[in-house]
């Protein structure tokens, strides 16, 4: 008698029209969420499936009271949205909580303007076992025997877009001390 494969009943990670309820459709808004990073609720976090790293910007760096000596070396240059090469200040590993799940994340710290405090990319999504949908403004991931979700803020995404459009390059001052790593 042939052995049967043991089937495990797991809830499916999927999106439906029901997930769009509460959003203004149609839209092209970024997926912007709030996450708990290093014990603090952090707003204006963009989820970007196209990013191969997690990025931390000066507002969050300053808000978490991080110092240059908290960073470890990160020598690879990054390319920003506008195509400019950005030399990272370093990297730091911090806990990121999404509802009941916590994963350790390596953030690349950059001294560049962004309306976002951080960008969460594929490494975080994969560590969480998550699937994101910009159309539905949600991130869904398995947790125990259920599917948890983070709901994005469409109004925050639009505020970030306006801030990016209104930003005058060169107008901001550096958050990092000269000579710091």
Image (tube, rainbow, N blue to C red):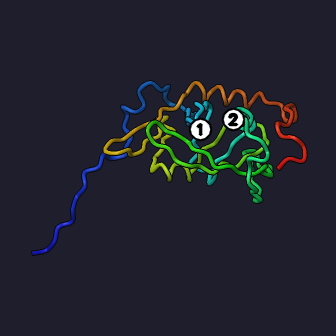
In the image, taking residue 139 as reference, residue 50 lies left or right, namely right
Q: Residue at x 46, y 46 (%)?
A: 131
The 10 Å Cα crowd at callout 2, few under 14, some 14 to 19, many 20 or more, is some
Residue 137 position in % (x across, y down): 49, 34
Is residue 28 at least partly visible in the picture? no
Answer yes or no: do the residues labelled 1 and 2 have beta carbons within 8 Å? yes
Residue 64 drawn at (x, y percent): 69, 35
The numbered mark at residue 64 is: 2
For the point 57% across and 41% down, the residue is: 47
Quadrant where the N terminus sits is bottom left
Of label 1 and label 2, which has the lower sequence position?
1
* Mark 1 and mark 2: Cα distance apart in space: 9 Å
- The image's mark for residue 37 is 1
How busy is the neighbourhood of tag 1: few (under 14 within 10 Å), some, or many (20 plus)? many
Left or right: 159 with respect to 6?
A: right
Q: Position of residue 44 (x, y in %)?
A: 62, 32
At 82% from the left edge and 50% from the top edge, which residue is drawn? 181
Q: Residue furthest left?
A: 1
Q: Is residue 18 visible?
A: yes
Give the percent coordinates (x, y) of residue 108: 70, 49
Residue sticking out furthest to the bottom: 1
How many numbered discs sit on the rendered protein?
A: 2
The residue closer to the viewer here, 121 or 37, is 37
Describe residue 154's horizontal placement relative to residue 110 as left or right.
left
Per the image, label 1 sits on a secondary structure element best described as: strand
Q: Horizontal placement of 145 versus 84: left or right? A: left
């Amino acid at each position: 008698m042939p052995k049967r494969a043991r089937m495990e009943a797991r809830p499916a990670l999927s999106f439906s029209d029901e997930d769009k309820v509460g959003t203004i459709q149609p839209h092209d808004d970024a997926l912007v969420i709030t996450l708990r990073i290093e014990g603090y609720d952090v707003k204006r976090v963009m989820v970007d499936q196209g990013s191969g790293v997690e990025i931390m910007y000066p507002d969050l760096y300053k808000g978490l009271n991080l110092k240059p000596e908290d960073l470890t070396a990160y020598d690879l240059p990054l390319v920003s949205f506008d195509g400019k090469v950005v030399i990272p200040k370093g990297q730091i590993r911090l806990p990121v909580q999404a509802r009941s799940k916590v994963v350790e994340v390596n953030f690349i710290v950059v001294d560049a303007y962004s309306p976002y405090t951080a960008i969460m990319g594929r490494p975080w999504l994969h560590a969480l076992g998550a699937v994101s949908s910009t159309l539905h403004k949600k991130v869904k991931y398995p947790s125990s025997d259920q599917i948890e979700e983070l709901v994005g803020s469409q109004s925050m995404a639009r505020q970030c877009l306006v801030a990016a459009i209104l930003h005058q390059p060169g107008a901001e001052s550096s958050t990092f001390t000269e000579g710091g790593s």
